[in-house]
Amino acid sequence: MRATTHAYYHAAQMDRFDVLIVGAGPAGSFAAERLARAGVRVALFDGRPPGEPKACGGGVTSKALKAWPHLLEAVGRTIDELDMYSPSGKHLHLKLDEPFAVYSRIAFDTFLRERARAAGAEVFTEKVSGRGFSRILDKSDAPRPVAIAPATDNNDGWIVRTQSGAEFSTKYLVGADGANSAIAKKLAGNLPPAEMEVAFGYRAPLPDSGDAATVVAFLPNWVGYAWAFPRVDHVSFGIATTQDAFEHESLDALLWDFMVAYYEVAQGGNLRSMRLWKKSDEAQVNNLRHTAERYAARIPGLAPRTWDTRKACGEGWALLGDAAGFADPVTGEGIYYAIRSAELFADTYLKGAPQEYEKLWRKDFGGELKRASEMRQRFYGNFWGAPFTDRMIEFARGHRGIRKVLGELVAGDQGYVDLKKKLARSALKPR
């Protein structure tokens, strides 16, 4: 009984919020803004060190830009052309009917976080520790390293402790803290390594010529792809692959060769003859190392069976974006799903029925993501004796209809559920 009184006393002294959101990426900030504008008292915790962006190409699909046009107000670059390469080096130049945008994640996340602050959300630059999860009500009054715990035995909300020792209480807890979410591990369970992907890369200067192409190149002998996404003041280079297939030394060498080839083309070469996957001179690589800044992160890539069983909400809690596993298992793209999940959760919360969030995300995009996970192995597998990505680019080079569908897939306007049917119909039309 003494421990119960102790916990209630501390909860009474804490700053109390209606909703407490851990993670100030696109999902957390978007949800905080929408809730705060409706008069909900929201706390938004941004635990990322200042100036440290998430490892991400920063691409925002045309589907997202059409759904939320205000995203175009963030400082970024609009992309209407894309160069793609197959594992064997086949080249395809795509002119996109619907452009997408590329942002620095520092700029993009700051833009959304400040909109949340302006709407009335209270933003804390504090990290919520993932260590020592346990109930706040214990048999002893001894201090414990509690980060997140139920506030009372009758489930009257949550107490959150930050790494600085500050404590907060809330009725509703939202985890938007990425693929490594401590909240998700506690409330929804761990994901195995096979259901995680790895993204790593470098931020490097724009070419001196200023001619910075947007490039996606599918990897030879690996699941995944490399990218070069030019931003306002630098180029984001990276590789995304499955955690099971991750071999840092080999993939890192592959990425440096890709980067060197990219700069060679920018200095007057031809994108059609970009020297992909060829060993670069070590002096060229070392020269580039002096100006490149490394980053890395994990991305969820859920298996088909997991989509049927994993929950994104429960009594008094919800998960958004990567924390919920909402990323495309084929491409790793997650910004659209982060924002859409935040929108769906906020709408259900404001209607007084947050438990409906589970049903809505499944109906809205859950089937699409499950279909993507079913297709991942085939997408990066073989088709008629060659990698499917080789065949896809080969067919697209010679067929306008297939090229159009591929462009829509890149832009986020073409889903996976009817992709096979759409490609078949396009192939039957005149070239």
Image (cartoon, rainbow, N blue to C red):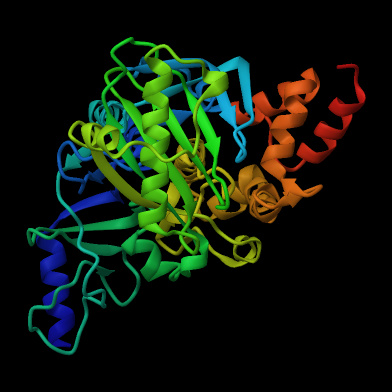
Q: Determine whether, in the image, residue 164 is placed left or right of residue 43.
A: left
Give the camera-side residue of 192 and 351: 192
Give the camera-side residue of 30 and 335: 335
Give the camera-side residue of 349 and 118: 118
- In which quadrant of the rendered image does the C terminus lie? top right
Residue at 14% across / 74% down in the picture? 145
Res 414 → quadrant? top right
Task: Say if 70 sits above or below 58 in the image.
Answer: above
Is residue 356 visible in the rendered image? The answer is: yes
Q: Total of numbered circles in the picture?
A: 0
Residue at 54% across / 50% down in the picture? 357
- In which quadrant of the rendered image does the N terminus lie? bottom left
- Indicate the position of residue 22 as horizontal and vertical percent values: 28, 51
Task: Say if 153 sits above or below 48 in the image.
Answer: below
Res 13 → quadrant? bottom left
Task: Say if 394 sits above or below 272 in the image.
Answer: below
- Indicate the position of residue 205 as horizontal and vertical percent values: 26, 23
- Indicate the position of residue 9 as horizontal and vertical percent values: 11, 70
Residue at 61% across / 53% down in the picture? 359
Q: Determine whether, in the image, residue 299 is placed left or right of residue 154.
A: right
Residue at 37% across / 23% down in the picture? 263
Q: Determine whether, in the image, residue 225 is placed left or right of residue 230.
A: right
